[in-house]
Image: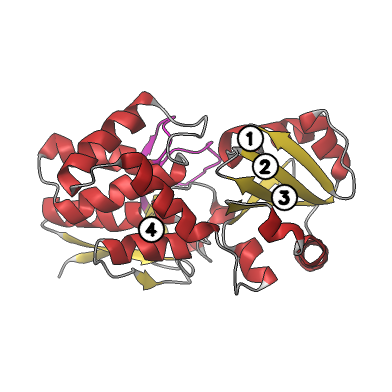
C-alpha cells in the first residue's frame, strides 16, 4: 500500500500556494512509485485563484484542517504559525518556499528555499528539467508567478521569474503576459459583496516577532475609492481581532495594483510601524508610495522595528 503524502500551502491560501500544491503533487506522482501525493488547501480559495482554476479547468484541492499524524510537504510557507492546525504533530517530508526562514523540525528533511518572486518558479524549473509539463500545469504555474510578482511590478520579481513566465506562456498558449496577468489580478481586486472579516482574512498572515504576535493582511484593489467607505468597518474589525487573538499589532495593507502604492491601516503598537517606515501614523493609517510587496517591503521593516525595541 502506498504512503499518502499531502502537499499544502499556508492558511488563507493565495494563488501561488494552491497552484504550487497542485503542480508539485502532480509532478511527485509522476516520479514516485511508493507514495501518493495529494494536494490540499488549508482554507477557502479566493476569487483570483478560483478564476485561475476555472480558466484552466482544474478542480480546487480538498480541504484539510488538521495535520496531526499526516505526512506533509509544505509549499509557499515554512512558519508553523501560518500552517495547518497541529502541524507540530505532522511528519514533515519536505519544504519548498521563497519566504524568510523561521523553521525547526526534529528530523533532517529536504528544505528548498530561494530568493525568487514565487514558489511556482522553483516548481516549474523542476518540471522543465524533466521535460514533463503539460498545458494546464504550465498555465497555473504561470498564473501563480504573475500573481505573486504583481505582474512583475513587485520588487521581489527576479529575472528567473520573468524567464520562466515566458517559457510557461508558450506552453500554455498565453500570448500577452501582461494582459493575462491583469485579468488575474482584477479577479481578486473587487471587494463587492464581501463581508469585512472576509476581506481581512482573504490574505492574512501571522508572524512572531520577539514573542509578539503580529498579523498582516494584504488587500489588492484597482481603485482606493472602493475601500474609502469601508475604512471604519475595517478598523473596527481589526480592533476586535486584536483583542480576541491577543495580537500586539494588526496591519491591513491596502495595495493599489494600478498605481503601485499602499495604505496601511494600523491597530496596536503604532510606534513600531512609525519606526519601521519613519513616518507618522495618523488616524490609524499611513500611505507608502511604491510599496506593493508585503514580503519584501513590509515584513522585514516591521521585524527590524521589533528587534530594535
Residue at 77 percent across and 31 percent down: it is 277
Q: Is 227 on the left-hand or right-hand side of 112?
A: right
The stretch drawn in magenta includes residue 239: no
User: Residue beneath label 2, please?
Assistant: 262
Dot placed on the residue nearer the N-terminal end, 4 or 1: 4
Please tell me how crowded label 2 is: few (under 14), some (14-19), or many (20+) other residues with Cα within 10 Å: many
Image-based side of 255 in relation to 78, left or right:
right
The mark nearer the N terminus, 3 or 4, is 4
Instruction: Compare marks 4 and 2 and give the one earlier in the sequence.
Output: 4
* Residue 53 higher or lower than 267, as above or below: below
Query: Which residue is depicted at the point 28% across and 70% down?
Result: 59
x 32%, y 38%: residue: 121
Please tell me whether mark 1 or mark 3 is closer to you in this view.
1
The residue carrying mark 4 is: 18
Magenta residue span = 93-118
What percent of the width, then of the height, locates residue 230? Answer: 75, 64
Q: Are marks 1 and 2 in contact (CB under 8 Å)?
A: yes
- Check disc 4 and report its element: helix, strand or loop: helix
Q: Main secondary structure of the magenta part?
A: loop
Q: Are marks 3 and 4 in contact (CB under 8 Å)?
A: no
Residue furthest to the top in view is 159
Asked where in the image residue 287 lies, by quadrant, the reply is: top right
Amino acid at each position: 500500500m502506498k504512503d499518502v503524502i499531502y502537499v499544502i500551502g499556508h492558511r488563507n491560501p493565495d494563488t501561488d500556494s494552491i497552484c504550487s500544491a497542485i503542480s508539485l503533487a502532480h509532478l511527485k506522482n509522476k516520479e514516485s512509485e511508493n507514495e501518493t501525493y495529494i494536494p490540499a488547501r488549508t482554507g477557502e480559495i479566493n476569487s483570483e485563484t478560483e478564476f485561475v482554476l476555472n480558466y484552466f479547468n482544474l478542480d480546487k484541492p480538498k480541504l484539510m484542517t488538521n495535520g496531526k499524524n499526516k505526512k506533509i510537504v509544505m509549499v509557499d510557507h515554512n512558519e508553523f504559525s501560518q500552517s495547518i492546525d497541529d502541524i507540530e504533530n505532522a511528519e514533515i517530508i519536505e519544504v519548498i518556499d521563497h519566504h524568510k526562514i523561521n523553521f525547526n523540525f526534529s528530523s533532517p528533511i529536504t528544505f528548498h528555499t530561494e530568493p525568487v518572486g514565487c514558489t511556482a518558479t522553483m516548481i516549474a524549473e523542476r518540471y522543465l528539467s524533466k521535460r514533463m509539463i503539460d498545458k494546464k500545469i504550465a498555465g497555473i504555474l504561470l498564473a501563480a508567478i504573475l500573481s505573486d510578482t504583481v505582474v512583475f511590478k513587485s520588487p521581489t520579481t527576479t529575472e528567473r521569474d520573468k524567464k520562466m513566465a515566458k517559457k510557461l506562456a508558450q506552453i500554455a498558449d498565453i500570448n500577452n503576459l501582461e494582459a493575462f496577468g491583469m485579468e488575474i489580478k482584477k479577479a481578486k481586486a473587487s471587494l463587492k459583496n464581501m463581508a469585512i472579516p472576509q476581506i481581512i482574512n482573504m490574505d492574512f498572515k501571522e508572524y512572531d516577532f520577539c514573542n509578539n504576535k503580529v498579523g498582516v493582511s494584504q488587500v489588492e484593489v484597482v481603485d482606493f475609492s472602493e475601500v474609502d467607505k469601508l475604512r471604519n468597518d475595517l478598523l473596527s474589525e481589526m480592533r476586535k481581532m486584536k483583542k480576541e487573538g491577543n495580537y500586539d499589532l494588526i496591519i491591513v495593507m491596502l495595495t493599489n495594483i494600478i498605481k503601485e502604492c499602499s495604505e496601511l491601516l494600523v491597530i496596536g503598537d503604532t510606534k513600531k510601524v512609525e519606526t519601521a517606515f519613519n513616518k507618522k501614523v495618523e488616524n490609524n493609517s499611513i500611505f507608502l508610495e511604491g510599496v506593493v510587496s508585503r514580503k519584501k517591503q513590509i515584513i522585514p521593516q516591521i521585524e527590524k522595528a521589533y528587534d530594535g525595541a
